[in-house]
Image (cartoon, helix red, strand yellow):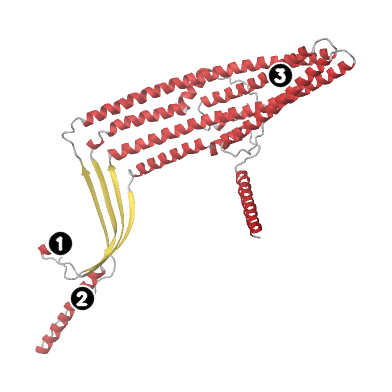
Amino acid sequence: MIRALRRFASLAIAVSWSFGAVGLLGAAPAADAQRAPMNLDALSAVRYALDHAPVILAKKASVDQLTATFTQRRAAEYPSFNGQLQNQIARSSNAQGSFAQFGISPDSNFSQNTAQVTSTYNLYNATAQITAEQAKRDAESANAELHVQEEQTTLDVSNAFYSLAARREAVVLAENDLAYQQQLLDIARASEKVGRVAGVDVLRAQVAATRSQSTLVQVRADEANAREALAVQIGASPDATFAVSAVPEPPMPKASVAALTAIAKVTRPEVLSAKATLQAARLGDAGIDSDLHPTVSMNGSFGNQNSPTNSVLTQQQIDLSNAEAIANFNLQRALFPGVAFPAPVLSGPVSRGRVGFWQFNITSSFSLPIIDYGTRAANHRAARAQIASADAAYTNALDFVESDVRAAARNVQAAFEKLALAKQSAQLARESARIAQLQYKNGLISFTDATQTEQTALSAENDLVAARVTYVVALVKLRLALGPPDPVAAADLRGL
């Protein structure tokens, strides 16, 4: 009985664990379904990558952080406005305080209410201004680096998408090759029956058909792997799907290389980043002497302030003074009843209204270090070395952009010419394979010749697909080399 209970408990635990595991595994597809976009074309895939790729999000976070730093530094140049509400209550007993040596003792009960608006404005502060300018250049440089990363991501995603399209066409070519080999097998079997070919041709045809079928299995697996790799690359789940169609063949750009280079030198983010770095280095050199400039600050405030404790004490003094005046008046009338004494002038009650106040002051300060033991000169040498380095990097960026545009234009031209040759070769190879099949069917050539002709045609078709991908990717790279404001526009080949 005990053994049976133990077996039942073990079975129950195993079943509950299995259901729990199924529940955990079953929850993942539901979560991944929200990250699995469907039927993305090339343009949509690039847009999705720029919104979800981890490397892009990391760059955007860096840009936002530097932008926040710049905003904070720039805010220090503007006047500040603050509102203040303050209530002060102090109670003491037998406490002389710090003013006892002057014969002043604090009130045992004191309270005060203050409501005011204050403002401070640094009219001139070279350190704050240069620091804000440096933060601005750093933010601009980071933004340019983000743009560079977006361009690289656009190129990588475009390349991966059109490579996926090539994989899809490779599957179609493999299916056609399998159909071609199956037709040769049917022809070999029919020719063997009539004694036109030997039985070995049937075996060869079976081997060729089997190899074609194996190739088809592999290219289908390669297509699935490429699809999942592209999905992960753009930040989506592996279940994402893509609307893969024939690789486009847009026309060649008509602008001259010189015109394209001129555009790129103005818009390329590498140039803008290097320029911002150079400007920041120059500001860093100027910031070394910022302590030699005067600092002028201004502050002011207005509001109202009253002390209920002082009002009570003042009112008590007024009441006591009025009582004494009335007592003296009554005493004089009693002593001299025949004299018409004037009525005493009594003081009015303390005003409970809150009297407004304002204050304003300007402070100018200027300090000049007499001996710095060479630190300022050393800092200037280091800063000027940074300027020389940044200037060289800026010049190199211009040269790199010019070389990159020339190379991109040259690659597009070469890819376009190779595409034309690949089209011609594929057309001739297709016709040659069709004729070879007819020749083998009529016994004019051997099975080996027919198979080799088909393999040549298949290779030419694959070369054509590769040439199309190479051309369209080279064109996207040339468009990215011009530094468009939106990198997605470089991948948009519609309407060309």
In the rendered structure, the answer to whether residue 250 lies left or right of residue 61 reads: right
Q: Is residue 374 left or right of residue 352?
A: left
Residue 336 visible in the displayed image: no
SS class, disc 3 = helix
Q: Nearer the viewer, mark 1 or mark 3?
A: 3
Q: Is residue 183 visible?
A: yes
**Residue marked by disc 3:** 458
Disc 1 residue type (three-letter): Ser
What's under tag 3, amino acid-wise? Answer: Leu
Q: Residues within 10 Å of mark 1 (few under 14, many from 20)?
A: few
Q: Position of residue 275 (x, y in %)?
A: 40, 28
Task: Tell me where residue 81 appears, x and y as whole percent.
Answer: 34, 52
Q: Secondary structure at mark 2?
A: helix
Quarter of the N terminus within the rendering: bottom right
Image height check: is 431 above or below 131?
above
* Circle nearer the N terminus (1, 2): 1
Q: Which residue is mark 2?
A: 316
Residue bearing the label numbered 1: 98
Rounded to the nearest angstrom, the CA distance separating label 2 from label 3 is: 113 Å
Residue 179: x and y, percent? Answer: 78, 23
- CA gap, disc 1 to disc 2? 27 Å
Which element type, helix, strand or loop, lies under badge 1?
loop
Q: State the quadrant of the C terminus.
A: top right
Q: Position of residue 365 (x, y in %)?
A: 21, 43
Question: Quadrant location of residue 85?
Answer: bottom left
Task: Give the quarter of the image for residue 136.
Answer: top left
Q: Nearer the viewer, residue 142 or 349?
A: 142
- Residue 431 in which image quadrant: top right
Nearest the eye: 485 or 30:
30
What numbered label is drawn on residue 75?
none
Could you say which is closer to the camera, residue 324 or residue 248? 248
Compute the Cα span from label 1 to label 3.
102 Å
